[in-house]
Image: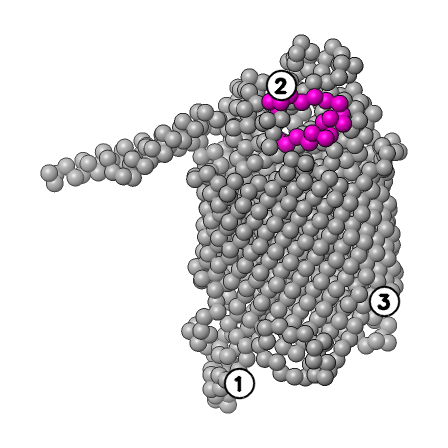
Amino acid sequence: MSITLRIIFALAFATSVSANAEKALPEDVIKVGYLYHFGQLTRWPDEALNGHISFCIYGDQGLGRALTELDGKAIAGRNIEISHLEKFESAKDCHVLFVRNSDLNRARLIVSSVSQLPILTVTDDERLVDAEVAIHIRNYGQRLGFRINREVASAANLTLSSRLLKLSR
Amino acid sequence: VAIHLDQLQKVFTVKAALAFIMFAMSAASPAARAVDVTDLSLEQLLSTEFVPANRRARQISDASSAVSIVTARDIQDYGYRTLAEILNSMKGLVLSNPDQYFDIGGRGYGIPGDYAGRVLLFIDGMPANDAFFNQIYFGEDGLIEVDLIKQVEYVPGPGSTLYGNNALLGSIHITTFDGGDLEGTRVSYERGDRGGERLQLSYGKQFDNSAHVLASISGFDDGTNEDPMRDLVVLDDFVTPEFNALVLDPLFHDENRRAFFKGAYKRWAFQTAYVERDFTIDERAYSLEDVEAAQVILIKDKNQISELTYDAEWGQDWAQSFRLRHGAYRYIEEGYVAKGNWWGGNTSWAYSGFERHSLIFGLEYRDNFELRTNTASFDFGAIEEFDFDDVESFVTSDIDVSNQIRSVFVQDAFQLNKRLLLSAGLRYDSSTQFGAAFSPRVAANLDVTEHLQLKLSHGRAFRFLDAAAENLIFNDSPELKKKERVEASELVADYRFSDKLSITGSLYKNKIKDALNFEFTNQSTIGRELELHWHDSNSGFNVRASYSKQSSSADYNFGNYLINAPDEVFTFNIAKSWFSDRITLGLDAKHVGRRLLFFEEEVVPASTLVNANMTFRHLVPNFIFSFRVNDLKKDAPRDSLGFGLAQPEDRQGWWLQAEYIFK
């Protein structure tokens, strides 16, 4: 077999192995997966919990569609409820607040207005990198990773699992 | 044995084809649609490659006009190397480079030699026009390397309500990467077929306490500094018996050095950008008989901007930002120096206490403390660097037209109901030199259906004379106080068929009063633009196409048309990716219609520029490689000099770029 052929076969093998191991997924689907795991790996103070766990989206509705996959699922026996925020005031009922693609000033205000409440704030908006957001999801080359701001999480009286902290960038 | 050769070849061809298909299928396996994402562990998600949800980028500005956006991914897919190439891919814009600087044109404007003084440039919010000529630099003289750019947004239409002086016809907003985007050390190298080279070193990091830094240095040399006698081109027009010398095309040589830094910690952020560009016009070939006496002219631009910002929040409803800025620009030519030094401060408050309102109120101060020109009688030749302050005795003129501008602005966005957003703004600018200007603007955004959005806006903007123009006008002339003013309206319809496909159409009209182009003129333009964007991550296609048509008039004493304003501009960009985005072929085309020059018989013919680019991503981890071929059709637009056409320039050629990130 010629060298070229060998290389082609080797490449085909290598890429098929790697492609099977990690099929590419749509960006929003991965983000929804992250939100689900963040919810699983966060402990809220007892008084903040009731029968359900509330995921709120503020801003762009795009992710909202992917999020509906979570509807009906449960975390630690609590049903997940999805809602889209239109008013600031309703943010206080959220457990996880995902802020994306919204007016920057409003986004800053909403995350700072809930910073003392037991709400896990998450964003994928790079403009909010300096804002009081507990978890930033962002692109790292071909993959999505996340960063945790421990100060913000502890100010919100949330306990993040050590596994989550370890996997954070 | 020889008889088997054919068979052998056949077998190998079949095998090779099979292998290729296998390779293609394995690498290009599409996203599994039926995946329940909650079944995947966090670790699995972290190691899963993602397919970008929608290449339709986020708009940074709050503009109601038909904004154009180019993302870092587009820059990579099409292999853009300068800000000029990025902007030239946008609908309706035409960048030209008749001499050592780029001009920008669009929506009727584009007077040759007018450079880029009626549009504002912001780099991460820092105003980046120089203080002396009020220009933007789009080429190798520009402040920023394109591979530090995350997104470029062009907002057509008047922007003075937000930005004050100079945002007459539009504003450009560049967002750069930050440390966390890079997360490592990147070395990139670029090489062109004519020997041009660029080397860039960047470092970025985001720390656990959320602080992030990014630093980059780079150098570029276009590779044309060889012996000027080598590529002699004889221009027949000038060869006369009396002038017993060959007249030859001068040689241009372009090189630059750049530095960029940005860092942020909590509410503080600082960034600075610096460029120095040396442009050499080698005219030795103009007089072969006397090479000694002939000239090599060095033109040097040095530009630097810096900004320190602090964002604060006061209680639930108030957010405030502070910005402290400084800019220094210097233009040096033989016997002439221009300096534009300034500093400024800006603070704005955002208030969200009123239900459904977003109020912003702000104050700004800008001190253009040194807008100075020196000319000297002494022949310094092609000096590398020269400071006129050191040799005052040779200085024949020293003019300083420094001035200060104080501004106050207010704007409100009112979400009347779920569908209708109304906004209004007003800004007042007062200059110690040019008097005052009011810039009002109103806009309405209406979500007619889930798919259709209409945006209507009307506004005014202004431009004070720049220091270079001011030097040409006598001190006591009333014309000194003249401002250019524009009044513009725009209607935009944005229809999204799906997440993949959208169409944007716009109708606009603008009237400019007292535009200073050779003389003070009034101009008006009406036009329409249509843009289609289709992005499908499953098939790997990304397509953007636009058509712009405009008609304009002016009251010049030589004619009632606008110079160098093409009636029609088409853009067409198509990129196709294979193997999970690892290989992308990008093709970008731009057609610019014919343009009239000073005398109606002088016409710049229509032309079509086509470029192609191939990018290979992460075939070896962290390694990106691309190859671009410019001007496939050999039909790049001829640039206009106003009184004629620039010499045709052969722009065909290739560029190769490689980058590696050390994590």
At x 48%, y 59%, the residue is B197
Residue B115 visible, this orientation: yes
Chain of the residue on which disc 1 is drawn: B
Check the residue under mark 3 and report the chain it is in: B
Would residue A128 be counted in the magenta stretch?
A: no
Q: Pinpoint residue B611: horizontal percent, then vertical percent.
A: 49, 52
Report, in whole angstroms, how far the alpha carbon at label 2 lies from the one at label 1: 78 Å
Q: From the viewer's perspective, is B152 left or right of B13?
A: right
Question: Residue B346: image x %, image y %?
Answer: 81, 51
- State which region is magenta: A146-164
Q: Label 2 is found on which chain of the structure?
A: A
Which mark is drawn over residue B293? 1
Mark 2–mark 3 CB contact (< 8 Å) = no
Query: Judging from the image, what secondary structure is the residue with disc 1 in?
Result: helix
Q: Amino acid at mark 3?
A: Gln
Give x and y (percent) for residue B141. Answer: 61, 61
Secondary structure at numbered mark 3:
loop
Numbered badge on residue A69:
2
